[in-house]
Image: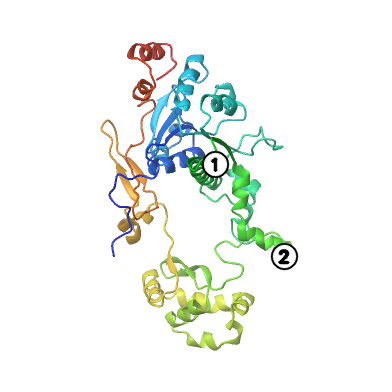
Amino acid sequence: MEAAKSPETDVLPLDGITVVDLTQVAAGPFATMALGDLGAEVIKIEAVGRGDRSRDIQPTPAYFDTLNRNKYSVAIDLKSDAGQEAAQRLVADADVFIESTKPGRADSFGLGYETVAELNPQLIYCSISGFGRDSPYEDLPAWDMLIQGMSGIMSITGEEGGEPLWSGLPSGDLIAGSYASQSVLAALYARERGRIDGEWIEVPMLDAAITWLTARAGYTFGYDEPFPRLGTHHPSIVPFGKYDCADGPIIIAAGTPDFWRGFCRALERPELLEDDRFATMDDRVENRKELDDILEPILESEPIEYWLDRLHAETVPAGPIYDTKTVWEDEHVKQRELHQIMERDDREDADVIDQPVHFAQLGTRLEVAPQQLGESTDSILERHGYSADELSQLREDGVIQ
């Protein structure tokens, strides 16, 4: 069967939508990249001389590249009056403006909601912040690890009996970025239906991260206890988690009666099905140690490939544990072509991860390779009424790059 791919088509969901992006590092860039993949023109405003802070995060430019394809970089000094005028021209013609600046910073740049809503009443304005307006932490700078700690995510990440751990991913950033792109799409739809003219959206990172607790919060709501750190095992499903084979670990998720029966067949241990200690899921959870004592030497007796072949033959969910290098060699990942190379004429090509959504009739795109700082300054500003002489003077004055 062929890998699911969006059709070769010029019909892009957000074709004709313009997004002005005043974000940096991860949360905002992840949101605007998603909109760009769907066909929006994304104009990324960056600071003259420095740009998005992630341009300096090692390894460069690989870190920046993974979050900033399908965007046109325009370098403007927003601390200058001329720079603010240029930015306001861009926003006045845009459909969406997304910012993730410190509280009050957008206002100081002449890009606060009240100001730009007068210039463009139909604008969808989205603010990504750490804590949101009127929070007791409103002025506290937010970083992903802080959000993971304050949201409860870090408390449930780590080995049993161990210390809380950062997840390794910028989860707080990515959660907020996902909500931002989702909410922008919802507002565009409402505007298209004539239900609103414009909108101001606020996405606080802490609020967004807390919503992802879902069933883990349900544990606390039900038992009035914190959800425990369990490492790679599940509190209410057994066998479920990491198990060691002769040459390394795998994940096994035998979370239903059918999977349990298939698991026992794969291990050639039918007697486990007759053992009263393991008759139901609750029994297996209650007698987890006794079951693990039986399973561990069995699984450690053969290599990963042996067990995965047997478990997959019984349709038991199981798989290897990859790292960020070996994942690209998996047959699924290669077939889906998730690792993409975007060519750049003037410098090293960009390694990016393809977007994961596939439509039956609509398309997506990987069209604009991550750009150098200010690569599109002239072309974008020319479209917004600036002459060559005016651009030359702005550059001489340090307003643009």
Q: Mark 1 or 2, which is nearer the eye?
A: 1
Residue 178, percent across and down?
A: 51, 46
Where residue 68 sits, quadrant-wise, is top left
Q: Which residue in the protein does label 2 denote?
A: 223
Which image quarter: residue 11?
top left
- What type is the residue that disc 2 sits on? Tyr
Q: Residue furthest right?
A: 224
- Residue 292 sits above or below residue 199 on the image: below
- Where residue 17 appears, as percent x and y from the top left, is 41, 36
15 sits to left or right of 126: left
Q: Which residue is mark 1?
A: 195
Closer-to-camera residue (384/350): 384
Closer to the chain start, of discs 1 and 2, is 1
Circle 1 Cα neighbour tier, 10 Å, few/some/many (<14 / 14–19 / ≥20): few
Identify the residue at image location x=40%, y=40%: 36
Q: Considering only vertical position in the picture, is 325 above or below 101?
A: below
Front position in the image: 309 or 398? 398
Residue 85 image position (x, y, % from top left): 48, 18
Which residue is at a point 59% across and 42% down the rendered structure image? 205
